[in-house]
Image (cartoon, helix red, strand yellow):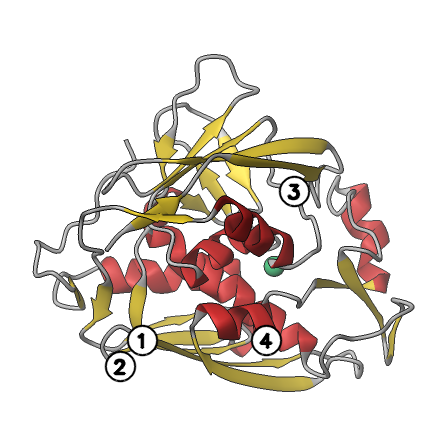
């Protein structure tokens, strides 16, 4: 059955890129309404439903552009989307009073606690899962690539490898089957990361202004500058998997199949969804309903 939250819950934090305070309200909604966003700081801007085709290309964060209000965007939603994917929350209105979701712990731990505190409420309508029927691929720059392949019913199996020049990261790999418990233990604590040498350049471009050693791993060549070090030897690839779990939920539907990625990023993950939805022969809904993704209006 589909689920939403048991009650409205809110939290306040800082945008990773904007550095500005932002308040987020997670509001329960009815069946078949999907994940919706609404900017409370922009007068009369209606809520819009998140779909894969309202994601605009951005290397550092996943950004959705409202099809209803020209120029209105919501950024850095991927860590919340990952928590909603793992917890199987199908329907939710996310209201925020700024352009960017808060970075909080740098992973998905705080969002998981919020979902836990609000509780999940089951709706009396069956969940529609997207099942991958045919392999699809996407390729990015610098040898990055990703695939979605048919897999086990109702399961999302993920495997990912990364390869960074900084010796403190280097080559890492991780694989898992998505489950709430596995996500909470192995993925949610893993923080976003940045090269120390890039910080000045990012901040000169008005990015990463809310980054701190509390919400991001800072890598300097062969060292991790955070005083308490890494939470896992391969924390970076686990965070990239967190991002993929969130990005793959931007269709608004739980996915079943196999995801395989190498050096993936937000733009490539979204390219992969475009490849999947390019043909109705690539996928189907688990309940046999017509393969049409609801529009974001
Ligand atoms: Zn991330």
Q: Earlier in the sequence, mark 3 or mark 1?
A: 3
Inter-mark Cα distance, 4 to 3: 22 Å
Write the residue at 42% across / 46% down.
Answer: 55
Ligand 1 within 8 angstroms of badge 4 C-beta: no
Q: Quadrant of residue 254?
A: bottom left
> Splitting the image into 4 quarters, where does residue 233 fall?
bottom right
Residue extending farthest to the top is: 43
- Residue designated by label 3: 102
In the picture, measured across the screen, residue 156 lies left or right of residue 191, that is left
Q: In which quadrant of this rendering is ligand 1 seen?
A: bottom right
| Residue in the picture at 78% in, 75% down | 230
CB atoms at circles 1 and 2 under 8 Å apart? Answer: yes
Q: Position of residue 80 (x, y in %)?
A: 53, 51
Q: Pointer 1: what residue? A: 155
> Which one is closest to the eye, mark 4 or mark 3?
4
Q: Is residue 24 visible?
A: yes
Residue picked out by circle 2: 151
Residues under labels 1 and 2: Cα distance?
7 Å
Q: 295 or 238, which is in the foreground?
A: 238
């Amino acid at each position: 059955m589909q689920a939403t939250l048991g009650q409205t819950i809110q939290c306040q934090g800082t945008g990773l890129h904007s550095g500005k305070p932002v308040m987020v309200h997670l509001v329960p909604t009815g069946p078949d309404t999907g994940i919706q966003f609404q900017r409370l700081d922009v007068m009369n801007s209606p809520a819009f439903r998140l779909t894969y085709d309202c994601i605009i290309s951005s290397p550092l964060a996943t950004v959705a552009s409202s099809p209803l209000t020209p120029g209105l965007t919501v950024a850095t939603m991927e860590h919340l989307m990952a928590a909603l994917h793992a917890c199987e929350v199908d329907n939710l209105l996310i209201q925020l009073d700024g352009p960017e979701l808060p970075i909080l712990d740098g992973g998905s731990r705080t969002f998981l606690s919020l979902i836990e505190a609000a509780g999940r409420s089951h709706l009396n309508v069956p969940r529609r899962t997207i099942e991958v029927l045919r392999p699809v691929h996407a390729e990015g720059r610098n040898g990055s690539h990703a695939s979605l392949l048919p897999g086990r019913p109702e399961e999302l199996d993920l495997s990912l490898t990364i390869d960074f020049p900084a010796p403190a990261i280097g080559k890492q790999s991780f694989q898992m089957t998505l489950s709430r418990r596995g996500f909470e233990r192995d993925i949610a604590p893993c923080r976003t990361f940045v090269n120390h040498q890039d910080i000045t350049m990012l901040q000169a471009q008005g990015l990463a202004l809310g980054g701190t050693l509390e919400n991001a791993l800072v890598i300097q060549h062969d060292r991790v500058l955070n005083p308490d070090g890494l939470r896992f030897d391969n924390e970076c690839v686990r965070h990239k998997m967190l991002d993929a779990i969130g990005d793959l939920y931007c269709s608004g539907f739980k996915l079943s199949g196999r995801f395989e990625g190498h050096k993936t990023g937000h733009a490539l993950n979204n390219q992969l969804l475009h490849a999947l939805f390019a043909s109705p022969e690539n996928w189907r809904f688990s309940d046999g309903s017509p393969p049409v993704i609801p529009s974001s209006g």
